[in-house]
Structures are given as C-alpha cells and as structure tokens.
C-alpha cells in the first residue's frame, strides 16, 4: 500500500485568544499523522501570542511551527504567509475559532485520493458550538437560507 501524502495545515489567528488553543490541539490530534501545521498570528492585540506559545509548548509537537506577524495583513495575508512555509501536496485551512474532529483530515484526504471521481476542493458542513463546546446547531446549512425551515437538522450520532 502506498504511503499517504503529507498534508499542510494553516491556522490563522487574529484576537482569538480564548479559542486558538483548541484549534491547534484539534489539528495536532488528527488521525492522519503526516501533517505540517503552521500557526500564523496576524498581529493580535489580545494575548493570543501567549495562548499560542502555551499550547505549542505543552504539545511539544515538531510538526507545529509558529509565525507571529508584526503587522496585521488580514486573513488572506496570514494565509499566504502560512502557505509560504509549506511544500505539501494537500493543504487544509483552519480558523482559530474553529476546531476539527479527529477524522477530519483523513476523510478529506480520502475524497481527494478516490480514484473514481477526481476532486480538486473539498469542504464540509459544520456543527455550531458555543465557547464551552455545547452544540447549538447540528449543521450550518441555514446560514444562507431563508425558506422557513427550522434552524437545525437532526445530526447523525454515528459515522458511516
């Protein structure tokens, strides 16, 4: 069986001190282990720098690299800076106020490596949670919908 390709992860942060640690931990805990994780702080004015350094220190994961920008470049600029440090054939983007389930990268990589259907870009639905991780909505399909349907659908509790 051939080896799976490496996957790059760019985590961009601006003033998300309370959430960025969970984002970094969720990337580091992926079942796919060949990751290169670049955390880019976009000149935050809160203590995001301290929160990022703290979680990276506790993880002590050589796959993680930290870049602190000295001036705010916006999310696109922060993403470009993170991409500059990657040479992986696949890249995932993770906002600092989001986190992934452990199988996230594996499932997307499987879609890209599917020999029957060529795939260039993948995305997914999301679960909306509060700061304590409590589920608020089982899907985000309703963000751009105004058709009178309820603001959540039942979520599957098993992965199939």
Image (spheres, rainbow, N blue to C red):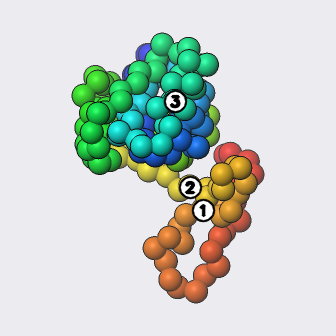
Q: Is residue 157 above or below residue 88?
A: below
**Percent x, y for residue 50?**
52, 30
Which residue corresponds to mark 1? 139
Task: Measure how far apart labels 2 and 1 are at the Cα level.
Answer: 5 Å
Does any portion of residue 16 appear in the rendered image?
yes
- Which of the two discs, 1 and 3, labels the residue nearer the N terminus? 3
**Percent x, y for residue 121?**
35, 46
Q: Is residue 116 above or below residue 130?
A: above
Disc 2 crowd rating (10 Å Cα; few below 14, some 14-19, many 20+) is some
Q: Report the residue at 29% width, 43% height from top.
A: 72
- Which of the two discs, 3 and 2, labels the residue nearer the N terminus? 3
Closest to the observer, 41 or 133: 41
Which residue corresponds to mark 3? 50
Disc 3 crowd rating (10 Å Cα; few below 14, some 14-19, many 20+) is few
Q: Report the residue at 57% width, 43% height from top.
A: 19
- Which of the two discs, 2 and 1, labels the residue nearer the N terminus? 2
Task: Measure how far apart labels 3 and 2 are at the Cα level.
Answer: 28 Å
Q: Report the residue at 53% width, 41% height from top.
A: 17
Task: Measure how far apart labels 1 and 3 are at the Cα level.
Answer: 32 Å
Q: Of the residues tagged 3 and 2, which is closer to the observer?
A: 3
Which residue corresponds to mark 2? 126
Residue 4: which quarter of the image?
top left
């Amino acid at each position: 069986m051939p080896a799976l390709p490496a996957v790059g992860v760019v985590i961009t942060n601006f003033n998300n001190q309370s959430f960025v640690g969970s984002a970094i931990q969720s990337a580091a805990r992926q079942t796919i282990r060949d990751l290169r994780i670049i955390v880019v702080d976009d000149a935050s004015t809160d203590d995001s720098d301290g929160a990022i350094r703290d979680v990276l220190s506790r993880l002590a994961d050589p796959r993680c690299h930290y870049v602190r920008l000295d001036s705010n470049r916006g999310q696109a600029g922060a993403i470009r800076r993170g991409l500059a440090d990657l040479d992986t054939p696949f890249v995932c983007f993770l906002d600092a106020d989001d986190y992934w389930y452990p199988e996230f990268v594996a499932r997307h990589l499987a879609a890209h490596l599917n020999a029957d259907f060529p795939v260039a870009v993948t995305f997914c639905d999301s679960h909306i949670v509060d700061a304590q991780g409590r589920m608020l909505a089982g899907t985000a399909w309703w963000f751009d919908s105004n058709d009178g349907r309820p603001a959540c659908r039942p979520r599957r509790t098993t992965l199939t």
